[in-house]
Image (tube, rainbow, N blue to C red):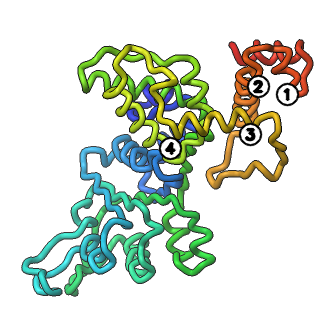
Amino acid sequence: MLNELKGFKQIIGESPQMLKVYNLIDRVADSDSTVLIRGDSGTGKELVARTIHNSSPRASKPFVPVNCGAIPKDLIESELFGHEKGAFTGAISTRAGRFELANGGTIFLDEIGELHPSLQVKLLRVVQEREFERVGGCKTISVDVRILAATNRNLETSIAEGTFREDLFYRLSVIPIYVPSLKNRLNDIEVLMNYFIEKYCKKKGRPMMEIASDVKECLCCYSWPGNVRELENLVERLSILVEGDTITIDDLPDHLKSDSLKSVTTLPSTKLTPESVTLPIEGIDLHSFINEIELSLINQALKTSAGVKSKAASLLGLNRTTFIEKLKKFSH
């Protein structure tokens, strides 16, 4: 796997979309350029940030994460830039902020789209000049720090709504990296499942579990709104609750089986139109995406037809010979 060859062992995936992410990490790691990591919640944006840091010349220096959406508005400035003694009620001593703590290393500003506009102005200066003053202080402090940021928001929409500064956006997104959603990299589901199964079986001291074939089909029909984090939580639960050595369809939670069943039973009557497919903000690999759709529809047709190939071919508007050829293509 390319991620292992490059030392990115914690990022799991072999799909073309993830290969692009690995290559971008490899190309940007040695620079000090600001990177904006975009993607839905649970896709692994912080993991990408840590990998960039660990692959850079700053790897031996601090990596300091800050969740901009989890810190109250009245505390975030002090959290980022520090404060002087007596700057406000409760400031009983001088305190260094996260930027100072990250000096020489990397600061990761997670959920940057949640930052209040009043703080965005001050952050813009730090991004441009790498200098700031603590709250209640007048001494300018300079830092040598690389800035990585991440968001699950559409910042272009936030700019149009006036809640995010356009100049800050362009300063942060010198190099954008899009982490694909799990539903757009279905080929990685089995790889991720096997990785998490090994992780949690070792952790709990139990024998390795196998995955039944109908479970794999069910997982590929699910939409995964929680992305990789949701899949990992599922495997951790299964490692506790499954008594045997094989994960069966009965072991899966009802909502997952229900969504899978809906996608199968609605196949013959669903009218697909170009408008029903939307382009994600991170873009797609068109060839890979079309192959994934084709494979998913073939699997659903086979399941709907109980494995009768002539009926499955008919559901897809294909003759039996063409359908068999497509099966052979995806079996290699």
Query: Residue 177, how many percent across, how many down?
Result: 54, 51
User: CB atoms at circles 2 and 1 under 8 Å apart?
Assistant: yes
Distance from Cα at disc 1 to Cα at disc 3? 21 Å
Q: Nearer the viewer, residue 13 or 241?
A: 241
Amino acid carrying mark 1 in the image: Leu
Distance from Cα at disc 3 to Cα at disc 4? 21 Å
Label 3 residue SS: helix
Pick whichever of labels 4 and 2 is earlier in the sequence.
4
Distance from Cα at disc 2 to Cα at disc 1? 7 Å
- Give the numbered dot on residue 286: 3
Pick whichever of labels 3 and 4 is earlier in the sequence.
4
Q: Is residue 59 left or right of residue 150?
A: left
Pick whichever of labels 1 and 3 is earlier in the sequence.
3
| Residue ranking furthest to the left | 92
Q: Nearer the viewer, residue 274 or 311?
A: 311
Query: What residue did someone put label 1 on?
Result: 316
User: CB atoms at circles 3 and 4 under 8 Å apart?
Assistant: no
In the rendered image of this protein, does residue 115 appear above or below residue 318? below
- Give the numbered dot on residue 301: 2
Q: Nearer the viewer, residue 111 or 299?
A: 299
Q: Crowding at label 1, few (<14), some or many (≥20) Cα neighbours within 10 Å?
A: some
Pick whichever of labels 1 and 4 is earlier in the sequence.
4
Give the mark count: 4
Distance from Cα at disc 3 to Cα at disc 2? 22 Å
Which residue is painted at 49% across and 25% down in the image? Answer: 250
